């Protein structure tokens, strides 16, 4: 990872000599070093600089290391904090681990121990998700045919199990799910593990084509059936004979095609456009939709009899945001695909990026995630994917959580109150940490709020409104 930018350590110690000694040591180790001799100064530095690790003394006169830890986790949760403690305060340091400290080290310490610990904390940030998750995945995917479908969440396991159960039958399957959830992938899985796997799998995108074109795609046409029909053409029903026909976006087809489709499904018969000869086709139908067909039936846009023909078995694929456990695995899967495709070596993605990906709403589901990873692999200059390789809207949706919105024209007094209340809320009511973050004393908090009751009342309001 030599081509990575320099990593930065912020050292916080009230004893100047110790701060300087640590600073010399870590500079020698190749880190960028920033130095503060008390907590508030450290928070200022943290706000304005890129920091990877904070190395702070636990016991300091004004703000101690524990509060610095809590405050820094509110400002920049991705920064790892290591606390330095003397023997008497080990218990406190252990407690700090629960508040998110990476580790602690007891005085007197060896240089090598500090250097190793910092290196590990930084490695944790640039977490190599790839190896870890790929191993898990290999352990679970017994079947070769499943290799392209990743999913360890309970809901996805159910989807895959249902697909496996219906595959050997000839029953028609309707797959429902939002855009990009993997409907086509599941359709193709069903075909490839079913009895027709050595016969064709033919897809028709019903939404992409205007009516007459769709009709000629499905059923074919005879020479001279319409202007431009210079040769006879076989339709998809013929091409898919003995195999599987995948009707994508079935919800979009017009009533006239619905009637024709119903006839093939009921009788197995159809004619080419402009033809009179009755043709027969033996196909298994799998269809997919991202609209709710039951609603479409109620609105008389979709024939109920056709629906029952298509829908002997329904498979619902849940949106990605309802199976976030799958995100790390999918990420690592796509990382592997795209680094190979782009001839790049990527060691992994940083932990904060994984957090962002896991929290995001994914309106475009798996396809969107796939595109985001491809883009990141193409863009990244390092061997680790970091926030700067993500699209801005995804990073922004995350950082909105760390903002307080002030309406234009709000009186200064109210703004102060709002900021205090929000900070209290985010620090789970810790008044000391709130005071430190805002650079005021705990007493000032009360003064600004008029009365304690008001603090509590406002806190209640915040709870109700959020
Ligand atoms: N569980 C999964 N594991 C691995 N890749 C997946 C998974 N689900 C979807 N994909 C990938 O995401 C992309 C979108 O999947 P697919 O085309 O199957 O979704 P879809 O529901 O048919 O989408 P649309 O509604 O846009 O037609 C494909 O490139 C597919 O390979
Ligand atoms: Mg699709």
Image (cartoon, rainbow, N blue to C red):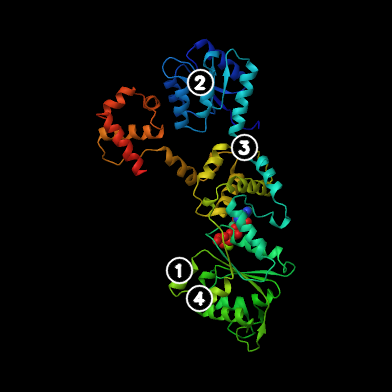
Element carrying mark 2: helix
- Residue at which label 4 appears: 304
Q: CA distance from mark 1 to mark 2?
A: 59 Å
Using residue 227 as the reference point, say whether residue 168 is left or right of it: right
Q: Is residue 107 above or below residue 436?
A: above
> Which of the numbered marks, if any, corresponds to residue 295?
1
Q: Nearer the viewer, residue 165 or 151?
A: 165
Q: Is residue 373 above or below residue 89?
A: below
- What count of labels does the image hold? 4
Q: CA distance from mark 4 to mark 3?
A: 55 Å
Element carrying mark 4: helix
- Residue at which label 3 appears: 382
Q: Residues within 10 Å of mark 1 (few under 14, many from 20)?
A: few
Q: Position of residue 53 (x, y in %)?
A: 54, 26
- Residue at which label 2 appears: 92
What quarter of the picture does the C terminus occupy? Answer: top left
Residue 228 in view of the camera? no
Q: CA distance from mark 4 to mark 2?
A: 67 Å
């Amino acid at each position: 990872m030599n081509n990575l930018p320099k990593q930065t350590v912020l050292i916080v110690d009230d004893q100047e000599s110790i701060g300087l000694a640590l600073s010399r040591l870590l500079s020698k180790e190749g880190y960028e070093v920033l130095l503060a001799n008390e907590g508030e100064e450290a928070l200022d530095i943290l706000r304005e600089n890129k920091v990877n690790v904070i190395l702070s003394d636990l016991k300091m006169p004004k703000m101690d290391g524990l509060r610095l830890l809590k405050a820094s986790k509110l400002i920049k949760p991705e920064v790892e904090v290591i606390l330095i403690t003397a023997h008497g305060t080990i218990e406190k340091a252990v407690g700090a681990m629960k508040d998110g400290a990476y580790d602690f080290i007891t005085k007197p310490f060896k240089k090598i121990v500090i250097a190793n610990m910092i290196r590990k904390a930084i490695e944790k940030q640039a977490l190599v998700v790839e190896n870890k998750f790929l191993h898990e995945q290999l352990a679970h995917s017994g079947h070769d045919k499943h290799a392209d479908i990743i999913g360890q969440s309970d809901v996805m396991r159910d989807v895959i199990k249902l697909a496996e159960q219906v595959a050997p039958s000839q029953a028609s399957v309707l797959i429902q799910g939002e855009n990009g959830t993997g409907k086509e992938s599941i359709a193709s899985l069903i075909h490839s593990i079913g009895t027709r796997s050595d016969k064709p799998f033919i897809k028709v995108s019903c939404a992409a084509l205007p009516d007459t074109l769709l009709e000629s795609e499905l059923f074919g046409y005879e020479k001279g059936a319409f202007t431009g029909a210079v040769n006879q053409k076989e339709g998809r029903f013929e091409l898919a004979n003995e195999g599987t026909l995948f009707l994508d976006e079935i919800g979009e087809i017009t009533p006239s095609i619905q009637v024709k489709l119903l006839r093939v499904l009921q009788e197995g018969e159809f004619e080419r456009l402009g033809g009179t000869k009755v043709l027969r086709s033996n196909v298994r139908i799998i269809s997919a939709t991202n609209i709710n067909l039951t609603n479409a039936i109620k609105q008389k846009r979709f024939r109920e009899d056709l629906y029952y023909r298509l829908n002997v078995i329904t498979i619902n694929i849940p949106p990605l945001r309802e199976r976030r456990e799958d995100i790390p695995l999918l990420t690592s899967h796509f990382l592997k695909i795209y680094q190979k495709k782009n001839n790049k070596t990527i060691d992994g993605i940083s932990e904060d990026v994984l957090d962002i990906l896991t929290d995001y709403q994914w309106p475009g589901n798996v396809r969107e995630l796939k595109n985001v990873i491809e883009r990141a692999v193409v863009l990244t200059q390092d061997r680790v994917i970091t926030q700067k390789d993500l699209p801005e809207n995804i990073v922004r949706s995350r950082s909105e959580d760390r903002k307080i919105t002030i309406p234009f024209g709000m009186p200064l007094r109210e703004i102060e109150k709002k900021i205090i209340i929000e900070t209290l809320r985010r620090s789970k009511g810790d008044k000391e940490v709130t005071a430190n973050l805002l650079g005021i004393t705990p007493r000032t908090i009360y003064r600004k709020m008029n009365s304690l009751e008001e603090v509590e009342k406002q806190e209640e309001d915040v709870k109700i409104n959020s």
